[in-house]
Amino acid sequence: MDETRRNLIKGMLTGGTLLVLGIPGIVQAASSSAVFSGITRDCHLLLGSTPIGEAFATGARAACAYYGHGAQDSLVTSQLGETLLVDPQYTANLLAQSKYMRWIAVMDYAHAAIFTELVRNANGRLLALGSHVSASNTDAALSLRHRWTTASPAYSAGGLLASMLVQNKRSFSIRENFLMASSHETGLMNALLPQFSSYGLANQSATHLHCAGITLPEASQLAGWETSTSWDSLATRPAASFIEHLPLGNWIETTGYAVVAAALGMGIHQEACAQRAFVHRPGNRNLDHDGLAGQQFVSFVIDV
Amino acid sequence: MTSQYIALPKGVSEKDFDAAIRDFRKILGDASVLTSAEQLAPYIKTMMPVPDADHTPSAALLATTVEQIQKIVAVCNQYKVPIWMISTGKNLGYGSAAPAERGQVVLDLKRMNRILEVDKDLAFALVEPGVTYQQLYDYIKEHKLGLWLSMPAPSAIAGPVGNTLDRGVGYTPYGEHFLFACGMEVVLANGEVLRTGMGSMPNSNTWQVFKWGYGPYLDGIFTQSNYGIVTKFGFWLMPEPPAFKPFVIQYQHEEDIVEIVETIRPLRISGVIPNAVVIAHALYEAPVKAKRSDYVSGPGSIPDEAVYRIMKDHKLGIWNVYAALYGTQEQIDVNWKIVTQAFGQSGKAKILTEQEAADDPAFAYRAKLMRGEMTLTEFSLYNWRGGGGSMWFAPVSQARGSETLKQMALTKQILAKYGLDYSGEFIVGMRDMHHIVDVLYDKTDPEQTKAAYQCFDELLTEFSARGYGTYRVNTAFMDKVAETYGPVQRKVHKTLKKALDPNGIIAPGKSGIR
């Protein structure tokens, strides 16, 4: 097998792939950027197959405009559509070509299963992997569930999302697992969101639970712990309010906003812990039904 | 003090692990030893209903040569560091790329991706573990070799080595993949390199054409096992037939599975239908065409009434039998007559050929798989429930109608008890059936995740109590399944392990072997 020739062809193809997707060459790319570990990365939004792509993108662009360099269109957006199922090599080439980029990707579960594999093959760094589900059952205990596996609290979006959803009076659970709390994050203080009561797992203070409008045992269960789990009250300090009145219409836009704000390194409502959860249930749950019941998707933040 | 690693191997101190990592870096270079959370996160995601923390690796090593692997096992022996090998790492629904136990070091062989030989005349291939089906497919096309592959549903992104070593199946006449394996190169735990079969003899040119060699046949002990690291793998390819005729036969009632199997078995054993036929339930095919939420909301498994509506709306049978004929047009014409006569007898079967069903997305992807072409359409299953939870339940059944009906009914009953749907299919072997059920659940829902775990546990318990063995399972349940095969087999497995890998450095826990 002539590997040199294969790589040459791959290189030619990937250049073409980027152009077809409307992504300018890396050097010329003018987009929102994030700085981590001294490296500046251009952020790009990748919309895979999912009906919620445009709503997510609306929130993502709002975050970019708010925290980035001003213009909403500064977040370069690419449409993947169904190509992952039909031609995964197309996306593999895209990842292979896009060095020093931060991709924010959103897609359904079928495509996400493939995309995860392509990210690993491309030696991508997976900063945050989120699973977002709106219950199709209107009688569900909570209308929204968000689950994240995040490399470290520095990439956490859960606190910001909780602070926004609670303002919108949505019922939700957010669970975040952090693979590593590295040294530069240990300075993060436990920041109290004013609506929530905060607890630490007894004998394991690196696990935090914040709940509002719901009993502690029930919150514990809905976040994935046993109702009998023992929690201690957590000493917190009031958090600064970061939230402006944003023109975001629904939970998907809000999620897009939070994911991109975190990807841009805004560091809002983050804590030094190994895992944490927010659980909220408002008094009037009718507000939960915004016509988006049953929607679900996966979000990625990756560096390649 | 906080560890600089996201996990440590069981029983290994951070100091020793540091030393091992330093040695790995000397062997592979810094860039090929991954230890940061961001680098390891893509190895962690599983679809099992257990915390990802249970399967978090401590590091990943990207090896490219046999010599590097020999050096790596020496370091592992020195520091008692366990490694978990993956080739392309696509064991989706069986544990993905994550190790069986927390803290194991992933030995990722994806960069060992050379196609070493493809022989057009003798129709075999010799490849390294990182070769994907897509890569091999492209190579065969590029060189106009006139050979077909057999591959599982993750086709393009999976590879023949990992799939065959886990005894996976495909859908062509070569669908029982390990039947067509011929010769391996294996790095043993002591660093020695074994070539199985004829490969052990210097200057032999029959390594990929004669399986057995001399003395006890060894290849089998390197499948679903942790006795060595396979670094080269030979297997047979199917010559492209002059003609190919895929078809689907639909039935409307679940109990019709009895008639289907009784009709297929003689055709399969006699070779009239030569491929690994699939008998897919409507709910296995539905995700290609329908959304669950359009038919049902709320908790519980999908009711039969909704399944029948899906069938009606999307032109599915409750059972959809996908099969194909291969050979010359004359052979196909003769066999087609036999097939249509056999299935036509009861009047229950609806037989559709490519002419009638070509535009049907379910038929289209099944036809592709039966001719060894790439398609990832089956991934649509993951959208059925959503939430990212999936486990393959894979008991083996006799190819006997009454047995398949019993297995299906029992599976469906246990799934329903936990509010889960029966997304099942039977893959027809020569005399057996691989009963494959995707236990799909929403991993964002703690209650459903707990139910999925209990459900899977009960499936294994109830099936083994009736003598139905599971042929393959995810890493969270490997010990349980190993237990169902009895103490003597476990003891033999352990004895072999002790003899070949006394320090237990290679994939401890794989198939319940330590």
Image (cartoon, coloured by chain):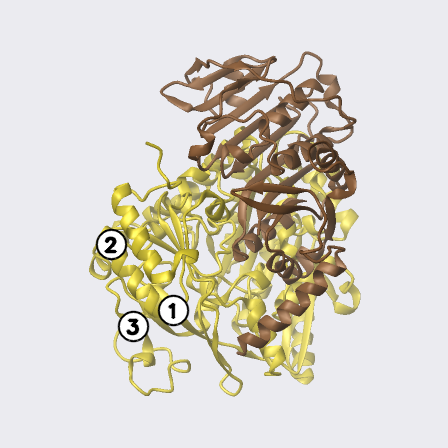
Chain colours: A brown, B yellow
Numbered label tally: 3
Check disc 3: other Cα within 10 Å, few if <14, some if 14-19, many if 20+: some
Element type at mark 3:
strand
Residue occupying image coordinates x 40% and y 44%: B477
B221 horizontally vs B270: left or right: left
* Circle nearer the N terminus (1, 3): 1
Q: Which mark is residue B265?
A: none
Q: CA distance from mark 1 to mark 3?
A: 15 Å
Give the residue at mark 3. Answer: B194
* Circle nearer the N terminus (2, 1): 1
Query: Quadrant of the rendered structure where residue B215 is?
Result: bottom left
Do tags 2 and 3 sit on the same chain?
yes
Instruction: Indicate the amino acid at tag 1.
Output: Thr
Residue occupying image coordinates x 49% and y 60%: B88
Q: CA distance from mark 2 to mark 3?
A: 20 Å
Asked whether the beta carbons under mark 1 and mark 3 sit within 8 Å of each other, the answer is: no
Give the residue at mark 1. Answer: B65
Instruction: Indicate the amino acid at tag 3.
Output: Leu
Element type at mark 2:
helix
Check disc 1: other Cα within 10 Å, few if <14, some if 14-19, many if 20+: some
* Circle nearer the N terminus (2, 3): 3
Q: Which mark is residue B494?
A: 2
Identify the chain of the residue marked 2, using the numbered disc in the image: B
Identify the chain of the residue marked 1, using the numbered disc in the image: B
Query: Quadrant of the rendered structure where residue B142 is?
Result: bottom right
Q: Which of the two residues, A218 or B425, is positioned nearer the viewer here?
A: A218
Element type at mark 1:
loop
